[in-house]
Image: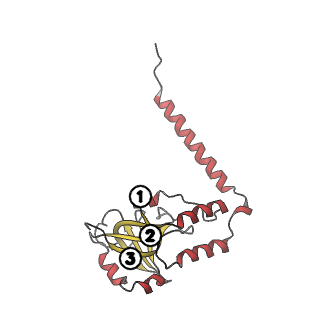
Amino acid sequence: MTEPVDMSRRCRRRDIARILLAVLIWSVVAHADPADVVPAAERTAHLQAMKDRVDEPLSVTSMTIAEMFALPRPPRAYTRAQLAEISALEAHGVSVIGYIARVDRMGDGDFHVQITEAPPPGGCLRRNTPDQFITELTPGVQARRPAYTLPRLQALCGTPTQVRISGWLMYDARHAQEAWRSTGWEVHPITGSACAAGG
């Protein structure tokens, strides 16, 4: 007679294996060779170069907000290998559909256009929440797209109108670990925006 399988024991072993794997990955990252970590000045210069792009991507890949949140999140002090992975993703143009939940003009002149998968309850939000995905319209693109004004974006905020935002994928490691943010990935800069079909 075959002995019954102890599923609870098997599940515990699987969970322990997952935890050990997570600890191993964390240990490798946390104890990376300091010589392999990209210097802060170089990380800042790379980030600025990505923000300063004004050309439109030759092609864009459609992604959902959930897929954006699922992208890897390297630490603030990332390694050369991680920079290569980040740069490979940043070479892609993307488009994402959502509802504008919050719009703010930032001190550097960027317009933060924060979108969610569902219309925000109660209209345009005045706070940040983990379900908001960050997209940014930079002054350089604003100069090329004069129709993309702050009042027009604010008029769509908190409404049931779906928008399709396209632009460059960019990783902002400085904000990746903030409690309210689900990812450091952004569409930044925005190079195109339109009402989604059926929105």
Mark 1, other Cα within 10 Å: few <14 / some 14–19 / many ≥20: few
Q: Residue at x 45, y 61 (%)?
A: 68
| Badge 3 vs badge 1, beta-carbon distance below 8 Å | no
Q: Position of residue 50 (x, y in %)?
A: 55, 74
Tell me, for residue 134, which label it has, or none.
2
Q: Quadrant of residue 167?
A: bottom left
Q: Earlier in the sequence, mark 3 or mark 2?
A: 3
Circles 3 and 2, Cβ within 8 Å, touching? The answer is no
Instruction: Determine crowd level at label 2: few under 14, some 14-19, many 20+ residues with C-alpha closer than 10 A.
Output: many
Relative to residue 15, is residue 99 depicted above or below? below
Look at label 1 and name its amino acid.
Answer: Ala
Horizontal and vertical percent position of residue 17: 57, 39
Under circle 3, the secondary element is: strand
Relative horizontal placement of residue 15, taking residue 159 as reference (left or right): right
Label 3 – label 1 distance at C-alpha: 20 Å
Q: Quadrant of residue 166?
A: bottom left
- Identify the residue shown where x is 47% and y is 16%: 2
The kind of residue on which mark 3 rests is Val
**Crowd band around label 3 with a 10 angstrom C-alpha radius: few (<14), some (14–19), many (20+):** many
**Comparing labels 3 and 1, the label whose residue is closer to the camera:** 1
Question: Which one is nearer the viewer's eye here, 120 or 199?
Answer: 199
Taking depth in this image into account, of 7 and 59 the one nearest to the observer is: 59
Q: Is residue 109 visible?
A: no
Q: Distance between the Cα atoms at labels 3 and 2?
A: 10 Å
**Residue that mark 1 sits on:** 66
Residue 76, percent from left and from top: 60, 65
> Considering only vertical position in the picture, is 198 above or below 136?
above
Disc on the earlier residue, 3 or 1 = 1
**Amino acid type at mark 2:** Ile
Q: CA distance from mark 2 to mark 1?
A: 13 Å
Q: Residue under label 3, please give it.
A: 103
